[in-house]
Image: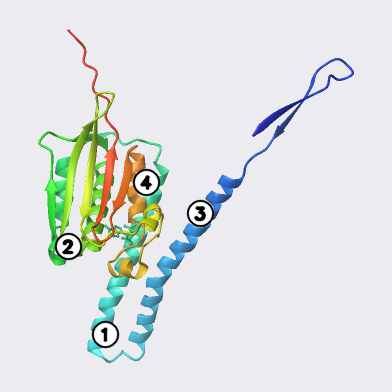
Amino acid sequence: IITPVQVPTAFDGTDQCMLMTFHDLTPLRRVEEMRVDFVANASHELRTPLAALSGFIDTLQGPARDDAKARERFLGIMQAQATRMARLIDDLLSLSRVELSVHVRPDTQIDLAPLIKQVADGLEPLAKERQVAIEIELPEAPAVIAGDREELLRVFENLIENALKYGASGGRVAVSVGSVPSSDGGVEYRVAVRDFGPGISPEHLPRLTERFYRVDVGDSRSQGGTGLGLSLVKHIVNRHRGRLLIESVMKNGATFTVCFPPEKPRVRTEN
Ligand code: ADP
């Protein structure tokens, strides 16, 4: 806040002016608190699998040294913990990369329909394992947006994978790509990922995109989750100047919709 204060005319006849500047430090302090929380959370998340690894190494060097069966089992668990750490580090790196480039809007022309198809095909083994059918509804015309292919793949992989993991009991996941005309003559594309599982209770909805936020930490860990997926999704969607909408009805699943801003129609020159 800058407040100029006019004081009475000085003896030499000139106006004196005093300038007082106040800085509200609340947002800066909040950013600093978030940074400290983030480092604490990240360290804690990395420490958990590390502690497990270290415990199993001790056991393998001690009591289980000559027990081939136990060794086999423990090595399997250690492998899973190492994979978990690698995934966490990957997600942290992706998040910081996206955060750094958030002001640059990606500009490759990308057709959403084949991209969604590619993600769904890649997740078919998980869908089979969870006995969930992925139903896809795509438009006939191309649904082209300006974007970053790798980042968009991450967005839809995360959303469809979550639907398969947390909404598996619904038996199916519906993914649709639709469009709505915008007032400036362009088209806004929307991709919705819907599951029919238990849903998410309303108090969690506003916090789901916070880093490391999970409705049920044990459930997320057992599914191989890191709590960073939706945070990454939100950052990528922001970088694309889009919006992420989350809706849920308890016992009737959750819908995650990504809306991409309309591309301005190309200006055509008359002959
Ligand atoms: P995670 O790595 O734990 O999956 P995310 O950031 O992707 O992290 O999701 C955060 C949390 O949101 C999850 O741990 C889960 O509790 C909840 N969640 C996400 N998607 C769904 C869904 N489709 N149905 C129910 N809960 C969900």
Name which quarter of the figure residue 260 lies in. Answer: top left
Amino acid at the residue labelled 2: Leu
Residue 177, percent from left and from top: 18, 42
Instruction: Measure the alpha-carbon separation of dots 2 and 1.
Output: 28 Å
Q: Residue at 38% of width from left, 47% of height from top?
A: 97
Please name which of the two marks, 4 or 1, marks the residue nearer to the observer.
4
**Which residue is tagged 1?**
71
Amino acid at the residue labelled 4: His
Res. 126 mark: 2
Task: Return the residue nearer the eye: 87 or 16.
Answer: 16
Q: Secondary structure at mark 4?
A: helix
Compared across the picture, whether 90 is left or right of 14 comes to left
Where is ligand 1, by quadrant? bottom left
Q: Earlier in the sequence, mark 3 or mark 4?
A: 3
Amino acid at the residue labelled 3: Met
Q: Earlier in the sequence, mark 3 or mark 1?
A: 3
Name which quarter of the figure residue 220 lies in. Answer: bottom left
Res. 34 mark: 3
Asked if disc 2 is less than 8 Å from ligand 1, the answer is: no
Amino acid at the residue labelled 1: Arg
Q: Secondary structure at mark 3?
A: helix
Q: Residue at 86% of width from left, 20% of height from top?
A: 10
Residue 51, percent from left and from top: 41, 75
Count residues near mark 1 (Cα–Cα under 10 Å), then give few for <14, some for 14-19, many for 20+: some
Count residues near mark 3 (Cα–Cα under 10 Å), then give few for <14, some for 14-19, many for 20+: few
Res. 235 mark: 4
Residue 73, percent from left and from top: 25, 82
